[in-house]
Image: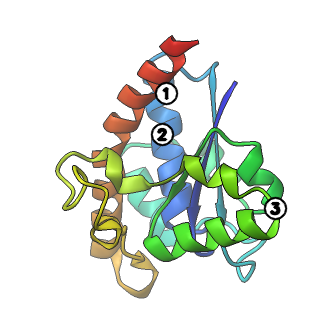
């Protein structure tokens, strides 16, 4: 099974939103039985907490079902996650740096090859074509804003998800 990990700060807004959007798309494309999606945060400050109520509301308003969203509990990424996932999608450059540091500390710096910026899969995102300006690919944290910020976050997540699906189709056909 191909394993993907979405990573943000506390695992209550961006990464769980991305997880549930990708899970939904995987079901639509018949890939849910071959791809497993999880999410985590670089911080432990929200560990055990549910998805932010505004993130949940944005997902529900967009038509995603509540069954799995309500069960979400935040968790911090661990060194073992890096080696056990085929693709780790960071929401910001600071998340990518934190994950790479964790891999280095765990003695698995080669595992950093599969740490990628989430929005790099959105062909319309600034810098997506070059990968050189990673900071342009940051998914801003909606936690400090209102519902409009969560809607923008969801739009960014959805825009990258189709690219992730296409990437997965190519990856899964290699084997």
Which element type, helix, strand or loop, lies under badge 2? Answer: helix
User: Looking at the image, can residue 74 be seen?
Assistant: no
Q: Secondary structure at mark 3?
A: loop
Q: How is the image coloured?
A: rainbow
The residue where tag 1 is placed is 26
In this figure, which residue is indicated by the disc labeled 3?
107
Residue 152: horizontal and vertical position, in percent? 27, 65
Q: CA distance from mark 2 to mark 1?
A: 6 Å
Would you call the spot at circle 2 few (<14 residues within 10 Å), some (14-19), or many (20 or more)? many
Per the image, label 1 sits on a secondary structure element best described as: helix
3D distance between C-alphas at marks 1 and 3: 33 Å
Residue 45: name its quadrant: bottom right
Q: Measuring 60% from the left and 65% from the top, which residue is drawn there?
A: 51
- Residue under circle 2? 22
Q: Crowding near pointer 3: few (<14 within 10 Å), some, many (20+)?
A: few
Assess whether mark 3 and mark 2 are in contact (beta carbons under 8 angstroms).
no
The residue carrying pointer 1 sits among few (fewer than 14), some (14 to 19) or many (20 or more) residues within 10 Å by Cα, namely many
């Amino acid at each position: 099974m191909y394993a993907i990990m979405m990573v943000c700060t506390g695992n209550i807004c961006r990464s769980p939103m991305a997880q549930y959007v990708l899970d939904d798309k995987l079901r639509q494309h018949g890939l849910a039985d071959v791809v497993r999606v999880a999410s985590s945060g670089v911080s432990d400050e929200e560990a055990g907490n549910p998805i932010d109520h505004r993130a949940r509301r944005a997902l529900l308003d967009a038509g995603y079902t509540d069954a799995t969203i309500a069960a979400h509990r935040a968790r911090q990424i661990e060194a073992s996650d890096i080696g056990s996932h085929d693709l780790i999608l960071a929401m910001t450059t600071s998340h990518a740096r934190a994950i790479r540091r964790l891999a280095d500390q765990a003695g698995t710096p080669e595992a950093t090859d599969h740490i990628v910026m989430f929005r790099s899969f959105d062909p319309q995102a600034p810098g997506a074509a070059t990968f050189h300006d990673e900071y342009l690919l940051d998914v801003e944290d909606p936690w400090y804003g209102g519902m409009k910020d969560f809607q923008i976050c969801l739009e960014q997540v959805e825009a990258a998800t189709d690219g992730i699906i296409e990437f997965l189709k190519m990856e899964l056909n290699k084997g």
